[in-house]
Image: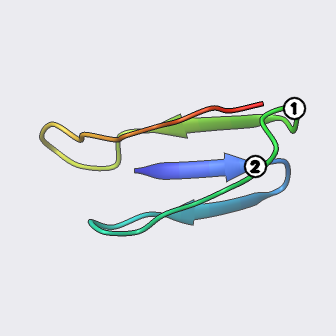
Amino acid sequence: MNLSVEQESWTLQEGDRFRFLSSRPHRFANAAAGETRVLWVNCL
């Protein structure tokens, strides 16, 4: 999965994790040829 938060970008692999304030501009995309599964949790 490709993840961008503001001006930074990462290509995440299986087992990677991330954390950021959801109020920051962000976007994501599937970088794999097949299906990508992500567990994404938002909390206040």
Position of 25 with respect to 35 (left or right) is right
Picture coordinates of residue 16, whole percent (x, y) = 41, 68
Give whichever of 1, 41 is nearer the camera. Answer: 41
> Which three-letter amino acid code belongs to the residue tagged 1?
Ser
The residue depicted at 82 percent of the width and 44 percent of the height is: 21
Position of 1 with respect to 3 (left or right) is left
Which picture quadrant has residue 33? top left
Quadrant assignment for the C terminus: top right
Q: Residues within 10 Å of mark 2 (few under 14, many from 20)?
A: some
Q: Please determine whether, in this image, residue 35 is positioned above or below residue 33.
A: above
Picture coordinates of residue 5, whole percent (x, y) = 75, 49
Of helix, strand and loop, which one carries label 2? strand
The residue depicted at 48 percent of the width and 51 percent of the height is: 2
Position of 40 with respect to 27 (left or right) is left
| Mark drawn on residue 23 | 1
> Which three-letter amino acid code belongs to the residue tagged 2?
Val
Which is more N-terminal, label 2 or label 1?
2
Check whether the beta carbons of the residues at disc 1 and disc 2 lie within 8 A of each other.
no
| Mark drawn on residue 9 | none
Which picture quadrant has residue 7? bottom right
Which picture quadrant has residue 36? top left
Residue positioned most to the front: 44
Q: Which residue is mark 2?
A: 5
Task: Say which of marks 1 and 2 sits in front.
Answer: 1
Position of 41 with respect to 16 (left or right) is right
Q: Residues within 10 Å of mark 1 (few under 14, many from 20)?
A: few
Q: CA distance from mark 1 to mark 2?
A: 10 Å
Residue positioned most to the left: 34
Picture coordinates of residue 26, whole percent (x, y) = 73, 37
Of helix, strand and loop, which one carries label 1? loop
Picture coordinates of residue 12, whole percent (x, y) = 43, 64
Give whichever of 23, 5 is nearer the camera. Answer: 23
